[in-house]
Image (cartoon, grey):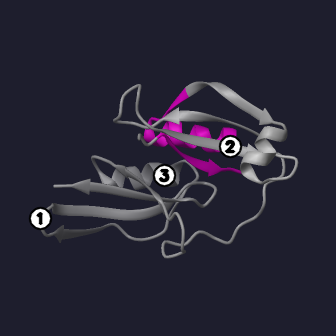
Amino acid sequence: MRFVHVNVIAKDWRALSRFYQVVFGCVPVPPERRLSGAWLEAATGVPDAALEGEHMRLPGHGDGGPTLEIFSYKNNLDRPAPAANRLGLGHIAFEVADVHAALERVVAHGGRAIGQVQSADVPGKGKLTVVYAADPEGNIIELQAWA
C-alpha cells in the first residue's frame, strides 16, 4: 500500500494551482486532466460528472512522492466555511524554514491568516512553531517549523 494524493476541489483550479506553485513550490505533473463519462459518474456518485485540473508534486518527496490534486467539477457544490475543528479532513500541512515568512507569502498571494504564530515545546519531539492559514479559496493550511 502507498499513499498517492490529496484532492482539493476548487472554484478556479488554475488559480489555486498557481498559488500552491508560487507559495509552496509545488510542481505540475502532466498531463492536465479533463475527465467525464459514465465511468466517472459511477465512481464518484456525481450525476453528469465532468472535471478538469492537474496533479502537482508536493515539495520534499522527489519525483515519486505524493501529489496534490486540484480539480474543478463542471458543477461544483458550495460547502460550509472550513473550520479547524470541523469533522472530516481538516487541513494540509507544510513544514517550512520560517513560519512568519511563509505566512507572509500565503497572505501576499491571496490567502489569509486564521490564527497567530505560536511556539510550544512538544514533549519528546522539540519546539514547534505553528500557525493556521487559508489558501485563496479558504482551504486550511498548517505552517510548521521544528527546532
Q: How crowded is mark 1: few (under 14 residues within 10 Å), some or many (20 or more)?
A: few
The part of the image, by quadrant, that contains residue 53 is top right
Q: Residue 53 carries which label?
A: none
Do the numbered discs 2 and 1 sit on residues whose CB atoms are within 8 Å? no
Q: Which of marks 2 and 1 is nearer the N terminus?
A: 2
CA separation, marks 2 and 1?
A: 39 Å
Please tell me which residue is depicted at 77% across the width and 41% down the height of the picture: 40
Please tell me which residue is depicted at 41% across the width and 40% down the height of the picture: 2
Q: Residue 71 carries which label?
A: 2
- Mark 1: which amino acid? Gly
Q: Name the residue under label 3.
A: 106
- Mark 3: which amino acid? Val
Give the extent of the magenta segment: 4-28
Image height of 87 relative to 135, above or below? below
- Label 1's element? loop
Can the viewer see residue 12? no
Q: Earlier in the sequence, mark 3 or mark 1?
A: 3
Can the viewer see residue 103? yes
Do the numbered discs 2 and 3 sit on residues whose CB atoms are within 8 Å? no
CA separation, marks 3 and 1?
A: 30 Å
Q: Which of marks 2 and 3 is in front?
A: 2
Q: Residue 124 carries which label?
A: 1
- Label 2's element? strand
Left/right placement of residue 99 relative to residue 36 reads: left
